[in-house]
Image (spheres, rainbow, N blue to C red):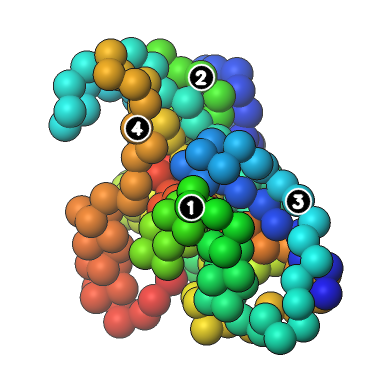
Amino acid sequence: MKISLLYFGRPRELLALSNETADVPDNITTLGALLAWLRLRGEIWNKELADNRVRCAINQEFSGLDDSIHDQDEIAIFSPISGG
Amino acid sequence: MSVSIQEQDFDVAAELAAMRNNSNKIGGMVTFVGLVRDFSRDGRVDSITLEHYPGMSEKALDNIIAVASARWNLIAARVIHRVGLLLPNEQIVLVATASQHRGEAFAACEFIIDYLKTDAPFWKKEQTPDGGNWLETKTSDVQRIKHWSAKNGEAA
């Protein structure tokens, strides 16, 4: 399935990537599994996308690791927010 | 009720005048202005850079204002959040609320800035003499939110 991935904050800077379209295997069905799959890309990914370092949003709603992902979703991965 | 996310600075007096000129029923307006400090826990701060999630940040702020409006009788609410490079002493954020009586404007203004800290997707990076630090949600900000749900037994 095709997933649109956006990166903000620290992961955007350290991965030097702000967005991509990823072709995600169909057996990846949750946000937690997606992060684990992305962590296989290399050392920096493994470190920066650790479950306890990032927060995520699915289609612009904050989401948890157990939430389901679907074809064409917009998934954002970011460091904890710090506005205001 | 309106939200702007912008690089340019804002004029608090002009924003309040616009709010006031829109209604003769307003008894009080409350404003919160967040500023860039030149220090942090780790020392001197030379600048900060703010980024946001376009689309989601506007939606999140609209939602916070909607929850505040359901809870208090607001005549108007305005949020402006700046993004980009900001120097010490510059304005970062404006929250302004107007209501018939001051109590509701005070409470709603505080509620909106408290939830902005925990629910709106913005990121701050401090530039210091030693490099840069991405700031993270403060535990104290998460704690502050709890008193709002404890007060009315409802979650926002």
Q: Position of residue B90 (x, y in %)?
A: 40, 16
Q: Say which residue label 3 marks.
A: A20
Q: Nearer the viewer, mark 2 or mark 3?
A: 3
Circle 2 residue: B85
Q: Where does residue B87 sit, x and y in percent of width and height?
A: 40, 14
Residue type (three-letter) at the residue carrying disc 4: Asn
Write down the residue under mark 1: A43
Is residue A84 visible in this depiction of the protein?
no
| Circle 1/circle 2 CB separation < 8 Å | no
- Pick the front one: A49 or A73: A49
Tell me the subunit letter for badge 4.
Answer: B
Callout 3 crowding tier (Cα within 10 Å): few <14, some 14–19, many ≥20 = few
Residue behind mark 4: B133
Q: Nearer the viewer, residue A42 or B66?
A: A42
Mark drawn on residue B143:
none
Mark 1–mark 2 Cα distance, whole angstroms, equals 30 Å
